[in-house]
Amino acid sequence: MARLLIVEDDELLRDGLEELLTRAGHTTRTASDGEAALAQLQAQVFDGMVLDLGLPHVDGMTVLRLLRARQSAMPVLILTARDGVEDRVEGLNAGADDYLTKPFSMDELLARLQSMLRRASLPAFGATASPAPALQPPADTQATPTLSMDAQLPRAWLGSTALDLTPREWALLDLLLNQQGQVVSREAVLAAWQAQPGEPGAAGALSSNALEVYVHRLRRKLAGSAYGIRNIRGLGYLLDGPGA
Ligand code: CA
C-alpha cells in the first residue's frame, strides 16, 4: 500500500485511475493540472506518481524536472501520447522511471506501477528514504571507479563492483564503452543485439522504443558513478565518463 499522486487532466481517465489504484489498496490524491500537482507535492509526501505529460498551465515535464531538482527520487510513471517518442525519451532523461503510451490497459498500468514501487523500495535505489548510512560502499567506489568489461565471461565491473547486466544491456554498454566519447547510432545497437546468440533474427523485431528502455535501465545501473549516457537527438547515444 502506497501513497500515490495521480496527475491527469482528462477527468474520465483521472477518475478511472483513482478507482483502480484505490481498489488496489493504495491511498490516492489527484491533480488536474501541473500547478495543482506541484501544490500537492509541496504539501505532502508521496511514494509514487502517475504523471500525464500533456497538462494545462504547467506541463508534466516541468513538474517532473522540478521534482527531480529537489533531489526527490520518488518513482514516477509518465503517460504520453501514442506518437510522442521524443516526449518519452525526454521524460526518461528528465528522470521518469517508466512510461505508458495512451491508450493503455488499466491492468498494465497497475502491473508497471507495482513493479516500479517494488524496485523503489529496494535499498539499492534508495527512492523512499535517504541513503542508509549502514550500507557502506566498497572502498574504491568512493574514488572514481572505472568501468571495465570482459568479453569472454561476459561481465562488467564498476571498480570492483560487478554490474548485473542482461545480455542486451551488456552489448549496449560494450558498444558505448568501445566508442566512448563518440556517438553510437541506434542502428549499431540494434545490429549488435540481433547478432547475439539466441536473439530472434528478424530485422525490425527490435524497436527503438526497446532501445530507449534499455538505455534508461543502463543509466540507472550507472547512477552514482562518473559515467553517464547522453542521448544525442536524432543520432544515437554517447557515453561520458573517465577516460573519454
Ligand atoms: Ca493530457
Image (spheres, rainbow, N blue to C red):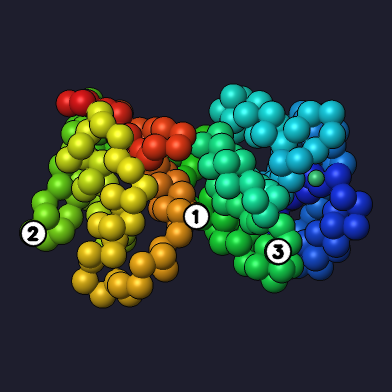
Residue at horizontal 84%, vertical 34%? 56
SS at mark 2?
Answer: loop
- Disc 3 versus disc 2: nearer the observer: 3
Q: Mark 2 and mark 1 in contact? Answer it, CB < 8 Å.
A: no
Q: On the image, which quarter does residue 182 sit in? A: top left
Residue at horizontal 45%, vertical 59%? 207
Q: 10 Å neighbourhood of mark 3: few (<14), some, or many (≥20)? A: few
159 to the left or right of 68: left
Residue 86 placement (x, y as % from top left): 57, 41
Q: On the image, which quarter does residue 32 sit in? A: top right
Q: Which numbered marker is on residue 152?
A: 2
Which callout, 3 or 1, points at the residue further toward the start of the chain?
3
Task: Give the alpha-carbon distance from disc 3 to disc 2, as whole Å.
Answer: 41 Å
Position of 178 relative to 188 (above/below)? above
Residue 40 placement (x, y as % from top left): 81, 35
SS at mark 3?
Answer: loop
Asked if ligand 1 lies within 8 A of label 1, the reply is: no
114 to the left or right of 208: right
Amino acid at dot 3: Phe
Position of 35 relative to 2 (above/below)? above
For ligand 1, give the image quadrant: top right
Q: Which numbered marker is on residue 209?
A: 1
Image quarter in which the N terminus is found: bottom right
Report the number of discs: 3
Task: Give the alpha-carbon distance from disc 3 to disc 1, as whole Å.
Answer: 16 Å
Q: 10 Å neighbourhood of mark 1: few (<14), some, or many (≥20)? A: few
Amino acid at dot 2: Gln
99 to the left or right of 81: left
